[in-house]
Amino acid sequence: MVRDLTGSWEPIFMLAIAFDFTAALLAILVLKRVRSRALALDAAPAAA
């Protein structure tokens, strides 16, 4: 669909690159916090 509109594959590859960078940024910002919270909960003593 995008190739038909633009006549080129370049915008499709640029869009894929943008999605890759977005996923990497989310992994760094979001998953890092989730991981640190999970590790903190795991390290906390269990209330028995």
Image (cartoon, rainbow, N blue to C red):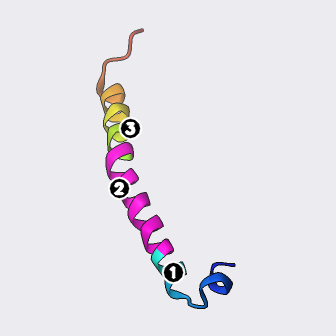
Going by the numbered disc 3, the residue's amino acid type is: Val
Q: Is residue 25 above or below residue 46?
A: below
Residue 12: say if magenta.
no
Check the picture and name the quadrant holding the N terminus: bottom right
Q: Residues within 10 Å of mark 3 (few under 14, many from 20)?
A: few
Depth check: 3 or 19 in front? 3
Give residue 31's position: percent from left, percent from top. Answer: 38, 45
Secondary structure at badge 2 equals: helix
Give residue 2's position: percent from left, percent from top. Answer: 63, 78
Q: Is residue 47 above or below residue 5?
A: above
Q: Residues within 10 Å of mark 2 (few under 14, many from 20)?
A: few
Depth check: 41 or 23 in front? 23
Quarter of the image holding residue 35? top left
Please name the residue that numbered disc 2 is placed on.
25
Please name the residue that numbered disc 3 is placed on.
34
Which label is found at residue 11? Answer: 1
What secondary structure predominates along the stretch shown in magenta? helix
Residue 29: say if magenta.
yes
Going by the numbered disc 1, the residue's amino acid type is: Pro
Is residue 27 shown left or right of residue 7? left
Report the span colored magenta: 15-30
Give residue 18's position: percent from left, percent from top. Answer: 43, 68
Going by the numbered disc 2, the residue's amino acid type is: Leu
The residues bearing labels 2 and 1 have C-alpha atoms spaced at a distance of: 21 Å
Q: Residues within 10 Å of mark 1 (few under 14, many from 20)?
A: few
Residue at (39% x, 10% y) in the render: 47
Give residue 21's position: percent from left, percent from top. Answer: 38, 65
